[in-house]
């Protein structure tokens, strides 16, 4: 006897997952829905996969987008990197190869948070004109210490962020030992699930036990979890970069910035930093009832933001 039918937003088979080899023998898994609409690239962060966008895809297709949702290299159903690189430039080049070379699009809109936002920023700077609009939330931002300081922004992390950074330091500096401790699928799933729960990255109650299990399941695979730590090793200099990131200059791409204010891991001055990093900026807007995972926690609000900001691109 089969079990109960899962909710569409918790059903891993709700969307067809395709695969394409993009570059350096990396195979990306991706969802592509709404072909013929304006291309919209949705990029996940950590500890996420394409599943974090399950509440967004159908509404954005109905709005007129062709929605493209990949798993980054080393995440989910995508392959690990044969060159061992998981830095911003490697991810950005993969996504350009997918959207431009494989799917044939000259430009796109893009949306993402966390690591995904950083990848989008690099993508827009690396390939001028390719990213027509970007909507970013609770993500890493360009490294502009002098410009931030000139704007009155303290360049040092807040005490709250430093206290929450234990995961960042271990994954970036002690990744092999951490991976060795997480020596079973259950332990790996529980480790990732903590970021959707008691670590307060999300607004309290935003993720049910079923939703947490859905998000953490792809990290049961030991190779994928270990590969996902590579992003932190790249950031802290313990893993070689594929090349220098485009992350030391403001981004000229027209931008909407959103801030899920219940996030306890992102810089509290994220909104002020956005005003420096994005000269062509709408916002930043504070989003109540959302934390780090804004695309899940306030899906309808984000979907409406993308629809309104890109209305003229939708035809």
Image (cartoon, rainbow, N blue to C red):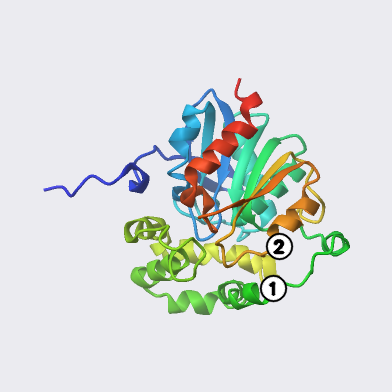
- For label 2, the SS is loop
Residue furthest out toward the front: 288
Q: Earlier in the sequence, mark 1 or mark 2?
A: 1
Between 104 and 12, the residue placed more toward the observer is: 12
Residue at position x 63%, y 72% from top?
Answer: 161
Can I make out residue 274 in this image? yes
In three-dimensional space, the C-alpha distance between marks 1 and 2, rounded to whole angstroms, equals 9 Å
Residue at position x 38%, y 70% from top?
Answer: 190
Above or below 99: residue 145: below
Q: Residues within 10 Å of mark 1 (few under 14, many from 20)?
A: few
Q: Residues within 10 Å of mark 2 (few under 14, many from 20)?
A: some
Q: Which residue is mark 1?
A: 158
Left or right, 141 with respect to 295, comes to: right
Query: Residue 51's spot in the image, x, y percent?
Result: 44, 49
Residue furthest out toward the top: 315
Residue at position x 60%, y 43% from top?
Answer: 111
For the residues labelled 1 and 2, say whether their Cβ atoms are less than 8 Å apart: yes
Can I make out residue 100 in this image? no
Between 106 and 60, the residue placed more toward the observer is: 60
Answer with the quarter of the image where residue 13 lies. top left
Above or below 214: residue 58: above
Query: Residue 290's spot in the image, x, y percent?
Result: 52, 55
Q: Which residue is mark 2?
A: 269
- For label 1, the SS is loop
Residue at position x 71%, y 35% from top?
Answer: 130
Query: Residue 209's spot in the image, x, y percent?
Result: 33, 61
């Amino acid at each position: 006897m089969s079990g109960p039918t899962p909710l569409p937003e918790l059903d891993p088979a709700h969307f067809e997952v395709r695969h394409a080899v993009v570059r350096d023998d990396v195979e990306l898994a991706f969802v592509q829905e709404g072909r013929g609409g304006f291309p919209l690239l949705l990029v996940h962060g950590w500890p996420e996969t394409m599943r974090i966008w399950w509440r967004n895809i159908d509404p954005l297709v109905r709005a007129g987008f062709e929605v493209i949702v990949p798993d980054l290299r080393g995440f989910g159903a995508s392959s690990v990197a044969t060159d061992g690189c998981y830095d911003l430039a490697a991810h950005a080049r993969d996504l350009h190869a997918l959207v431009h070379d494989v799917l044939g699009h000259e430009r796109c809109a893009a949306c993402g948070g966390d690591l995904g936002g950083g990848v989008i920023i690099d993508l827009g700077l690396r390939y001028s004109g390719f990213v027509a609009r970007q909507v970013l939330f609770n993500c890493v931002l360009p490294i502009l210490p002098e410009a931030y300081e000139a704007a009155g922004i303290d360049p040092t992390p807040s005490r709250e962020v430093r206290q929450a950074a234990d995961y960042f330091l271990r994954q970036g500096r002690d990744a092999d030992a951490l991976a060795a401790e997480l020596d079973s699928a259950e332990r790996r799933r529980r480790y990732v699930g903590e970021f959707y729960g008691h670590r307060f990255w999300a607004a309290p109650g935003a993720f049910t036990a079923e939703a947490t299990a859905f998000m953490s399941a792809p990290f049961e695979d030991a190779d994928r979890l270990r590969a996902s730590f590579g992003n932190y090793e790249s950031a802290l200099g313990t893993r070689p970069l594929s090349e220098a990131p485009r992350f030391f200059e403001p981004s000229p791409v027209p931008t909407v910035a959103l801030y899920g204010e219940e996030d306890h891991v992102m810089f509290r001055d994220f909104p002020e930093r956005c005003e420096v990093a994005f000269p062509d900026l709408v916002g930043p807007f504070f989003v109540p009832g959302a934390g780090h995972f804004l695309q899940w926690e306030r899906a309808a609000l984000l979907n409406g933001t993308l629809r309104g900001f890109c209305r003229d691109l939708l035809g």
